[in-house]
Every structure is written in C-alpha cells, then in structure tokens.
Image (cartoon, rainbow, N blue to C red):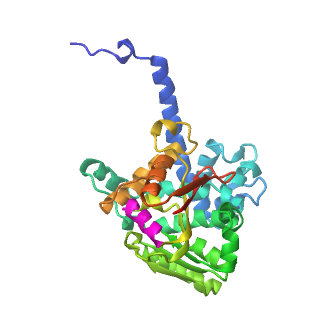
C-alpha cells in the first residue's frame, strides 16, 4: 500500500508548513547567534568594537587581545546575523552605536548580552533535564556552578540603577523608616548586593541576608568587607526553616520565591517573621498564571524555557513544589493571602518588562 503524501492529506496546509519551516530555520539561526553573543560578551569583543571605527579582524583581535582566527570566524556569525556591519571592499567590520547600546557593558541595565550567557549554562545540563522528562525528579542547584555569578552580574546592574532611588520608594514611607533605622531581611539574597547597597545607603538600619548557596554567601561577605560595612551580615540558610517571629520591619525577596523548593512554607515563615506594622516587598516575574494570557508576553519563550531548564527543575530536585518561573500574579496573590497577608498592592517600574513589585502587609 502506497504511503499517502503530506500534500495530499486532507486538511494539510502546505503554505502553513512552508511558513513554519522558514520560521524554524530562523529559530535555529537565532539560537546559535545567541551563543555567539554570549561569547562576544565574555571575551569583551563587543566592548572592544564599540571603541573602534571600521576595523579589520586583526585590529579587532589586537584591541581585545584575542586570537585573530577565532575572532574572524566569530565575526562571520555577527555579520550574517546582522549585528556587525561589514565592508567587503576593505574587509572591515563595525559595531553600530545603536547595536552597542544593547549588548555592551557600557549599556548597563540595557545590556542583553548578560542574559545570553544563560543559554550555554542551560546547555550544560540539557542531558540531565532530558532524563528528568523521562524519569521525573529534577536537576540540583549544584549542577549549575556558574549560576550565582551570572545572576549577580545581571541583577547587580539593575539594583545599582534602581534599588535605592526607584524600587524602595514604591513602598510609602519606607525610605524614611530606613533612614531612621529598622531591621531588614533579604530572603534568597544571592551574592548579597541588594543588602549591601541598602546597608551603605541607610547606615542606621540593620540588614541580614539568607541564601541556600554557601558560594553566594561567601561572595556577599567579601563585598561587606570590601565596602567596610558594619550593619550587614549574611548566613547560609534554607529559608524554609526560617523561624524568627516578629523580628523584622522589612523583608525583601528579589526574584527568589519562584526558585524555592517550598515557597508556600517560605511565604508563611516570612509573614510570621514580620512585625505587625512590617512590610514584605516581593519582586518577581511579571506574568499571568494562565498560559493563554502570556501569549503576547515579550519574554514568554525565554521565561518558560529558563523555568524548564533551571527554576522548576531545581525545585523538583529537592522534592519541592516546582512552582516555576512563570507562576504568575494570580497564584502569587493566592499564596500571599494564604500566608497571612491581608493587604496587597502590585506596582510596576517604567521600563522594567520583567518584574512586578508586590507590597504585602499583614494588616
């Protein structure tokens, strides 16, 4: 019996198939181009090219102090990927200022190249994640040795630019209270940069940071020493075991709750650790809990992919809830209410497409 061709199958749209095939080719190119962007960031090539006029591969390699043959091949990817401009007559390359504004360190919080590094990080655990698809379970945090550094590189720039002057003022009266002196805890503090920024800005207040990662805590303590701070301390701690009733006036969580193995337990512990007039500032991914409401999210594919490759699987590795990166506003409201928070306000920061700012109180 002859096989029926796809073209003759009832309902098969050949034009749609061809359109999708073209789209898939674009995705393949974009995926590998993202990897090359990561390399351009790590090697400093973008930063070097931003300081140069049209230059040869030899000149670019010399400026970046790199091997010319590798630089030339990388430039081929950049040119065909429409990131770098190329003059065939002079065989010179130029990074337009308009492109540099999105992929160089000078771009600060607008530097998307820092996020490109996550692709190779996820690639390192791909086989382990594939095995979880078949057998369940998860990939532990220890399988991501560079995660702390990558998160710190991206988040520290945002915190430097926005934390003290933009984010903290979202909470009415908070800056004044911090100036007078209150007790503050940051849950899932990572490398501790947010705590250290606040400790420097508000010397009358007392700051504590807890994180599961001993490596992150070591980095936080090193920064405390470097900045000569006397009002910030850190400890390696599973925040699900937090038991410090009515101790803090402010508790913060910067994009850390969705990573927790036991987020419900953590939120309840946070509620109990706040004083009656205390406030919980939760910063987490701005999205809906419903997939159909995220169809137009500008970072949708990125967020669900990062969740699959890190946030969700790490939680499941510790027999957790597997909340995922895109747990969303509806579920966040539900969990905060269940943890004992009676008042909740959700704020946004102009230009920040990634995060929502939840201001939760017990009264």
Chain part drawn in magenta: 261-273
Residue 217: percent from the left, percent from the top? 48, 77
The residue sitting at the right extreme is 53
Q: Is residue 49 above or below residue 190?
A: above
Q: Is residue 179 left or right of residue 184?
A: right
Q: Is residue 70 visible?
A: no
Taking depth in this image into account, of 120 and 280 the one nearest to the observer is: 280
Q: Is residue 240 visible?
A: yes
Residue 100: percent from the left, percent from the top? 71, 54
Residue 78: percent from the left, percent from the top? 62, 48
Residue 52: percent from the left, percent from the top? 76, 58
Q: Tell me, yes or no, whether the highlighted magenta stretch contains residue 263.
A: yes
Q: Is residue 260 left or right of residue 299?
A: left
Q: Quadrant of the N terminus?
A: top left
Residue lying at 73% horizontally and 58% vertically, measured from the top left: 50
Residue lying at 48% horizontally and 62% vertically, measured from the top left: 256
Q: Is residue 299 above or below residue 55?
A: above
Taking depth in this image into account, of 300 and 333 the one nearest to the observer is: 333
Q: Quadrant of the C terminus?
A: bottom right
Q: Quarter of the image holding residue 67?
A: bottom right
Taking depth in this image into account, of 250 and 286 the one nearest to the observer is: 250
Q: Is residue 308 above or below residue 181?
A: above
Majority secondary structure of magenta residues: helix
Q: Is residue 350 left or right of residue 53?
A: left
Q: Tell me, yes or no, whether the highlighted magenta stretch contains residue 116.
A: no
Residue lying at 71% horizontally and 62% vertically, measured from the top left: 106
């Amino acid at each position: 019996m002859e096989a029926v061709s796809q073209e003759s199958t009832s309902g098969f749209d050949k034009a749609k198939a061809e359109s999708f095939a073209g789209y898939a080719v674009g995705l393949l190119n974009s995926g590998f181009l993202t990897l090359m962007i990561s390399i351009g960031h790590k090697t400093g090539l973008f930063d070097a090219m931003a300081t140069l006029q049209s230059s040869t591969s030899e000149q670019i390699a010399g400026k970046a102090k790199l091997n010319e043959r590798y630089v030339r091949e990388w430039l081929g990817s950049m040119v065909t990927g429409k990131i770098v401009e190329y003059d065939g007559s002079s065989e010179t390359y130029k990074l337009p200022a308009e492109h540099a504004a999105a992929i160089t360190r000078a771009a600060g919080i607008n530097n998307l190249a820092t996020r490109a590094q996550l692709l190779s990080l996820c690639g390192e655990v791909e086989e382990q994640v594939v095995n979880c698809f078949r057998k369940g379970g998860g990939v532990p945090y220890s399988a991501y040795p560079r995660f702390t550094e990558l998160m710190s590189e991206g988040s520290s720039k945002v915190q430097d630019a926005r934390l003290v002057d933009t984010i903290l003022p979202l909470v009415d009266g908070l800056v004044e209270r911090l100036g007078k002196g209150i007790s503050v805890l940051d849950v899932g503090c990572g490398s501790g940069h947010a705590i250290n920024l606040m400790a420097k800005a508000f010397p009358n207040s007392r700051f504590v940071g807890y994180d599961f990662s001993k490596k992150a805590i070591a980095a936080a303590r090193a920064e405390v020493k470097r900045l000569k701070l006397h009002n910030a301390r850190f400890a390696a701690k599973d925040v699900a075991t937090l038991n410090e009733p009515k101790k803090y006036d402010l508790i913060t969580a910067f994009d850390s709750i969705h990573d927790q193995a036991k987020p419900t337990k953590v939120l309840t512990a946070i509620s109990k650790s706040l004083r009656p007039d205390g406030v919980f500032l939760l910063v987490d991914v701005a999205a809906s809990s419903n997939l159909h409401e995220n169809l137009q999210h500008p970072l949708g594919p990125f967020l669900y992919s990062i969740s699959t490759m890190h946030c969700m699987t790490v939680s499941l590795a510790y027999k957790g809830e597997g909340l995922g990166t895109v747990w969303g506003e509806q579920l966040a409201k539900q969990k905060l209410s269940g943890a004992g928070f009676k008042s909740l306000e959700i704020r946004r920061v102009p230009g920040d497409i990634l995060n929502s700012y939840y201001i939760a109180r017990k009264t």
